[in-house]
């Protein structure tokens, strides 16, 4: 979730989505953009100021958006499953220690 990655993601999808809403893992709003990649809502104004220098050249077609690594749903579900299993193992060990 760096400013550059956010700008590239928005720039890459600016004309394929009516709206892009980016949140963190706890569903806190990071930013929101509308068709064309224009930022509409960015609660962290410092982050917004960091995104714009990366996004503006993409919007003005002076730069191409770079590809960024985005996990598929299946990859994320696998990761969450592995994390859940690890947490359960630790909890079981704690129970045996009591």
Image (spheres, grey):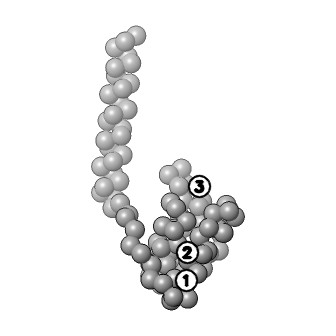
Would residue 91 be found to the left or right of residue 40 on screen?
left
Q: Find disc 2 in the rendering and name its residue.
A: 54
Q: What element carries label 3?
A: loop
Placement of the C terminus among the 4 image quadrants: top left
Badge 2 marks a residue whose secondary structure is helix
Q: Position of residue 33 (x, y in %)?
A: 58, 74
Q: Distance between the residues labelled 1 and 2?
A: 6 Å
Query: Looking at the image, which is closer to me, 42 or 67?
Result: 67
**Residue placed most toward the observer, 44 or 46:** 46
Q: Residues within 10 Å of mark 1 (few under 14, many from 20)?
A: some
Question: Which residue lies at the image location 35% right of the left edge and 60% below the top edge?
Answer: 71
The residue that disc 1 covers is: 57
Q: Residue 49, image x and y in percent?
A: 66, 69
Q: Position of residue 55 (x, y in %)?
A: 56, 77
Find the distance from the CA under tag 2 to the CA under tag 3: 22 Å
Q: Which residue lies furthest to the top in this view?
A: 98
Residues 38 and 17: in front is 38
Left or right of residue 13: residue 86: left
The single residue placed furthest to the bottom in the displayed view is 61
Q: Which of marks 1 and 3 is nearer the N terminus?
A: 3
Of the residues tagged 2 and 3, which is closer to the observer? Answer: 2
Can residue 55 be seen here? The reply is yes
Residue under pointer 3: 28
């Amino acid at each position: 979730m760096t400013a550059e990655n956010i700008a590239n993601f928005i720039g890459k999808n600016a004309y394929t989505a009516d709206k892009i809403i980016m949140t963190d893992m706890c569903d806190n709003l990071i930013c929101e953009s509308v068709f064309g990649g224009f930022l509409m809502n960015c609660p962290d104004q410092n982050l917004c100021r960091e995104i714009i220098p990366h996004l503006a050249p993409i919007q003005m077609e002076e730069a191409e958006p770079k590809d960024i690594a985005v996990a598929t749903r299946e990859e994320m579900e696998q990761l969450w499953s592995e994390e859940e299993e690890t947490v359960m193992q630790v909890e079981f060990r704690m129970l045996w220690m009591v």
